[in-house]
Structure formats: structure tokens, C-alpha cells
């Protein structure tokens, strides 16, 4: 089964999340660097280390479903990813993912330093999880189980 990397694009930091054959998305260390080239290199290292097969990138849609103002910027970023990594890239709705993470943290009375990138990685894990839930078939039986057991 493929390994997925969820990517929440930002100009200063890029949130990252990992999903595998268990169908569970987890936030991982974000990509933070002084330039986009450095941040993309961190993504490259993550792709190699975690044997990523497909990328899932948050797409900035407006609340009414139209493309948001950052779409061109995200499209340019996605193009760089496609050219460099030659991996399938899925664009997924990222509406309210950061807001949802902030609300959950507020309910748990936790705060995150926005500069740490942890909020971005948690947001990436939310939309990656939605993607996995919609696209992975988890209806297989382990090899050691037979029908009727």
C-alpha cells in the first residue's frame, strides 16, 4: 500500500503529515527553512526517509468552493513538487483545517507557538486523514484470517 505525505503549504513553514497502509494520518516535523529551496529539500529528505509514493497538498478554497487568492502560489509550488519528485499529487480542500486544530487546542487548553510549524503539521494531518478515509479501501482481511472465522 502506498505511503502518503500531507503538505500544508506556507510561505515560511510547511506542515507535513504521514499516512500509510494503516489509513491513519499523523503530524510529523514541519519543513521550516529560510528559503523555499531549503523547505523543498526537507520535503525531499522526508520523501526518501518515509518512502513516500504520493503527495496530498492542501488546496486553498474559499468557503463557497471557489479557488482562494493563494491558489496561484500553491499551484506554482505543486508544479515544483511534480517536476522534482515525479510523484502523483492530489489537491485536497483545506478549508478550516487550521481553524479546527486551533479550536481543538483551545478546548484542551493548549497553545502552540505558530512559528514552530506544529499547527501546520496538525492541519496537514486533518486533510490527509480525510483523503485517506475517502480513498483507501480498508475492507481487506489479513492473510491469516479466513472467511467464517
Image (cartoon, rainbow, N blue to C red):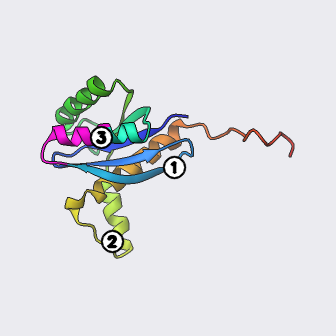
Q: Residue at x 30, y 37 (%)?
A: 44
Number of numbered discs: 3
For the residues labelled 3 and 1, say whether their Cβ atoms are less than 8 Å apart. Answer: no
Magenta span of residues: 33-44
Q: Residue at x 34, y 23 (%)?
A: 86
Name the residue tied to disc 1: 24
Image quadrant assignment for residue 117: bottom left
State the SS at label 2. Answer: helix
Name the residue tied to disc 3: 43
Q: Is residue 76 left or right of residue 149?
A: left
| x, y percent for residue 87 | 37, 27
| x, y percent for residue 116 | 24, 60
Specify few, some or many for label 2: CA neighbours under 10 Å numbering under 14, 14-19, or 20 or more: few
Q: Is residue 17 left or right of residue 30?
A: right
In the image, 92 versus 85, the foreground residue is 85
In the image, 75 versus 141, the foreground residue is 141
Amino acid at each position: 500500500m502506498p505511503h502518503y505525505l500531507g503538505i500544508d503549504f506556507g510561505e515560511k513553514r510547511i506542515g507535513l503529515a504521514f499516512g500509510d497502509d494503516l489509513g491513519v494520518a499523523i503530524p510529523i516535523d514541519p519543513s521550516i527553512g529560510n528559503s523555499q529551496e531549503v523547505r523543498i529539500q526537507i520535503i525531499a529528505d522526508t520523501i526518501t526517509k518515509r518512502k513516500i509514493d504520493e503527495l496530498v497538498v492542501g488546496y486553498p478554497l474559499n468557503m463557497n468552493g471557489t479557488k482562494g487568492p493563494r491558489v496561484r502560489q500553491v499551484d506554482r509550488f505543486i508544479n515544483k513538487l511534480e517536476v522534482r519528485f515525479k510523484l502523483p499529487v492530489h489537491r485536497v480542500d483545506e478549508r478550516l483545517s487550521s481553524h479546527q486544530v486551533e479550536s481543538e487546542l483551545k478546548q484542551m487548553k493548549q497553545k502552540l507557538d505558530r512559528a514552530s510549524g506544529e499547527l501546520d503539521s496538525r492541519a496537514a494531518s486533518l486533510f490527509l486523514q480525510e483523503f485517506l478515509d475517502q480513498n483507501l479501501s480498508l475492507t481487506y482481511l489479513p492473510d491469516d484470517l479466513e472467511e467464517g472465522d
